[in-house]
Amino acid sequence: MCGIVGYIGNRDCLGLIIDGLKRLEYRGYDSAGVAILNEDGEINIFKKKGKVKELESQFDFKKLKGHTGIGHTRWATHGEPNDINAHPQSDMTGNISLVHNGIIENFKTLKRKLENEGYTFTSDTDTEVLANLIQYHFKQKNDFELAVRLALTEVEGTYGLAVMNRSEPDKIIIARMGSPLMFGLGKDEIIVSSDAAAIINITKNVIYLEDGEMAVIKFDGFKIKTIKDEEIYREVMKLDYDLEEIEKSGFDHYMLKEICEQPEAIQNTYRGRINFGNGEVKLGGIESVKDDIINARKIIIIACGTAWHAGLLGEYMLEEYCRIPTEVEYASEFRYRNPIIEKGDVVLVISQSGETADTMAALKEAKRLGAVTVGIVNSVGSSIAREVDAGTYIHAGPEIGVASTKAFTCQLMSLILITLMIGKSKGTISEKELKEITEEIKVLPDKMKEIINKRNDYKFIAEEFKDSRNFLYLGRGFNFPVALEGALKLKEISYIHAEGYPAAEMKHGPIALIDENMPVVFIAPKDKTYDKIISNIEEIKARKGKIITIATQDDNEINNYSDYILRVPKTHPILSPILNSIPLQFLSYYIATARGCNVDQPRNLAKSVTVE
Ligand code: F6R
């Protein structure tokens, strides 16, 4: 949630900070602001409700010169999105300027304490309380670093923050607890951010802060300490992607670009990991815990949202092909329900961003309970990637569109690789089937391209249904999680209500919703579930629902049952969810654009949910 950028160096920083905030807008975009230390030693703050471009259009920025500054793009937690609640927040004297991601849970207690000391507040935010608390300690100790440290020892909750002080203008102090923060080391400049996207155009050399750490960033260097004042040495890491990868490359939206990138992304997920000669799968990052996984008593998959849908498919695959009892859990539920973890249990954590607060907290709980933890993560070097015992990166590349697309299909591919790795080692998958699957993986990117090349066909269906108020998505077996994911994609970017169900479960309630106005999307591949799906389609047809099917290329029988058909090439059943997801992504994308929705930044959402 929210994005932070900070700069100290030899360049005028306003443009750099604004540029960085634009790259971070996918994390939150209900208000934005900057604080710049000007040439007279004053801190100028500009902030505005709305997107960064509204902030830009509001003020005559060009005149503002300065080499030190901080900026923020917000996703509101405390206080409605408006100009006053936007960050940076200042203390009542205007000495301290602070940008903050996260939630200060005890802010009411701290606010009362400060009010008793004569402090006054203008916003509804927890961040303003923290700014005043820092000023309170600064007044006592006259030492900025100490003041930040003392303030943070009083704080309960989560934060990633960057703070400036007019009285010690040569530095920015940053700190982290549960909300990502890093800084990049350029030539004569340091750029701070909550996300590599704002740093990569300046440098690839980055340092990640860990929870409970703070750093004092100066023009000529930095030092990292814990909040308990212990010095820390931290290695510089290299970002492994380029600026072009996080730009739109001529597509109208990041989401469209990311849907179309999937053939290449999937190839990156499996490249170098399958021996196509003998079907052996080698995942370097989890070699150290391979035996624990193969011999697991139980596997528990933990994730949120789209990643949870991938996890549900993981459960189906691991049970079918590896015969290991598997459960999939919402991260937010897992941690609060006293879960049972026993010796020999393995926890798989799936996360695109690697920063989701609930997933991180559940991971820590699983570790505390003694599980071997394994990550399936996209963001290299992210908090979850660093916290797990071992992990495999999905290598989907940066995903900027808020609705997850390529990360989902690459998460599925990673789960397939893990399934094949275990299945072969345990002998629970036959050599013949292993061969069939790996041969199919080789041609999967081409089959994905075939679907992508036909994307204009979806526009017509999108036009037909763009004014529908509800949708049902139905699938069976491996394609039930795909139905859930299809419904989520539609809801989040087009604001049309949609539900995913196991197709046969519909008779137990949702069928009451069916009338001539209800579009029902069936995922109907030619596999062992086909005849049953056809019966379910008949049930909807009899009640005049509109049938849209995702069907196999050469299936002519389906013509008798469908009002609209989206075709996908035939593949092995374990791979079919990857192909079937693509038409559903396009359907939601084109419906949302036909409705004039902002697909990359849907209302109320943020790419990375770093608050609980
Ligand atoms: C939906 C979507 C979310 C995320 C969820 C978990 O399109 O993107 O449901 O899947 O917030 O995020 P990660 O995978 O970053 O942990």
Image (cartoon, rainbow, N blue to C red):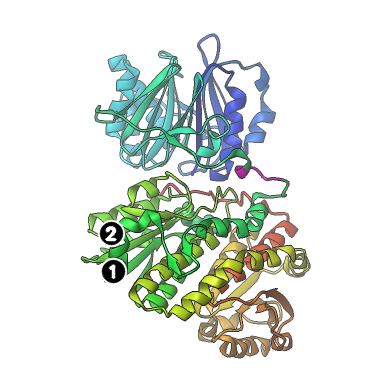
Is 398 placed left or right of 323 in the picture? right
Find residue 99 and report its horizontal and vertical position in percent: 46, 31
- The residue at which mark 1 appears reads as 296
Task: Kindly tell me whether residue 581 is visible in this rendering.
Answer: no
- The residue at which mark 2 appears reads as 372
Q: Image quarter for residue 340?
A: bottom left
Q: Which residues are magenta?
A: 245-249
Q: Look at the image and say whether residue 221 sits in the magenta stretch.
A: no
Find residue 189 and report its horizontal and vertical position in percent: 50, 21
> SS at mark 1?
loop
Taking the spot 66% from the left edge, 52% from the top edge, the residue there is: 257
Is 264 placed left or right of 233 in the picture? right
172 relative to 333, above or below: above
> SS at mark 2?
strand
Find residue 312 and report its horizontal and vertical position in percent: 44, 70
Taking the spot 36% from the left edge, 21% from the top edge, the residue there is: 135
Find residue 98 and report its horizontal and vertical position in percent: 45, 28
